C-alpha cells in the first residue's frame, strides 16, 4: 500500500499547487521578459474578480478596461496606488509584474 500513499501524497500536493501557491511560484519562475503570458496570469489571479477576463465585467463599480482612456503610465499608477474599491497593488506585485498586467489590460482593449 506504499504506492497508494505516495499517490495520495502526489494528489494532495497537486491540489495544494492548484491554489494560490501555484500561480505565485509560476509567476516568480516565469522569465522576466515573458510579459504577455505572465500578465495574463496575474490578471486572472488579481483582477478578473472585478474586471472579468475580458476586462468588461464592471463588478463592484469597476470600470470597463477596454474603454479606458488612461495612458500606460497612468494605468501603472492606478494599479500601484489603487482607487475607490480597487486596492493598491504595489505591496502585492513587483513593478515588473504591474507592468506585465497593465500590458495585458491594454491588449484586452484591442481585441474585439
Ligand atoms: C475589488 C475590485 C477590483 C479589483 C480586484 C481590481 N480592480 Fe481595477 N478597478 C476597480 C474599480 C472600482 C475601478 C474604478 C476606480 C475609480 O475610478 O473610481 C477600477 C479601475 C481600474 C483601472 C482604471 C480604468 C480607468 O480607465 O479609469 C485600471 C487600469 C484597473 N482597474 C486595472 C486593474 C488591474 C490590472 C487589476 C488587477 C491587478 C485590478 N484592476 C483589480 C475595481 C477593481
Image (spheres, rainbow, N blue to C red):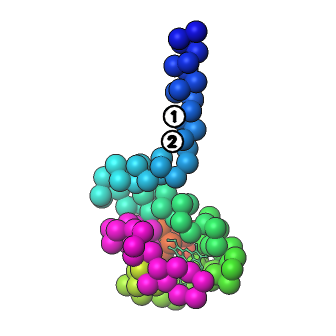
Residue shown at the point (55%, 48%) measured from the top left = 19
Task: Respond yes or no on whether mark 1 lies under 8 Å from ligand 1.
Answer: no
Location of residue 47 in the rendering, given as x and y in whole percent from the top left corner: 56, 69
| Image region (quadrant) for ligand 1 | bottom right
Q: Which residues are magenta?
A: 81-103
Location of residue 64 in the rendering, given as x and y in whole percent from the top left corner: 63, 80
* Position above or below: 111 against 84: above
Q: Secondary structure at mark 1?
A: helix
How crowded pointer 1 is (Cα within 10 Å; few <14, some 14-19, many 20+) is rated as few
* Position above or below: 70 against 55: below
Query: Where is the C terminus found, in terms of image quarters?
Result: bottom right
Residue at image mark 1: 13
Q: Quadrant of residue 45?
A: bottom right
Mark 1–mark 2 Cα distance, whole angstroms, equals 6 Å
Whether label 1 touches label 2, CB < 8 Å:
yes
Residue shown at the point (58%, 9%) measured from the top left = 1
Q: Quadrant of residue 33?
A: bottom left
Residue at image mark 2: 17
Amino acid at each position: 500500500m506504499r504506492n497508494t500513499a505516495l499517490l495520495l501524497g502526489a494528489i494532495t500536493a497537486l491540489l495544494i499547487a492548484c491554489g494560490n501557491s501555484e500561480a505565485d511560484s509560476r509567476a516568480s519562475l516565469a522569465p522576466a521578459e515573458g510579459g504577455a503570458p505572465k500578465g495574463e496570469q496575474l490578471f486572472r489571479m488579481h483582477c478578473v474578480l472585478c474586471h472579468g477576463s475580458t476586462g468588461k465585467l464592471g463588478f463592484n463599480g469597476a470600470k470597463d478596461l477596454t474603454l479606458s482612456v488612461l495612458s500606460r503610465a497612468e494605468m501603472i499608477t492606478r494599479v500601484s496606488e489603487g482607487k475607490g474599491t480597487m486596492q493598491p497593488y504595489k505591496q502585492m506585485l513587483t513593478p515588473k509584474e504591474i507592468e506585465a498586467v497593465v500590458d495585458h489590460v491594454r491588449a484586452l482593449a484591442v481585441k474585439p
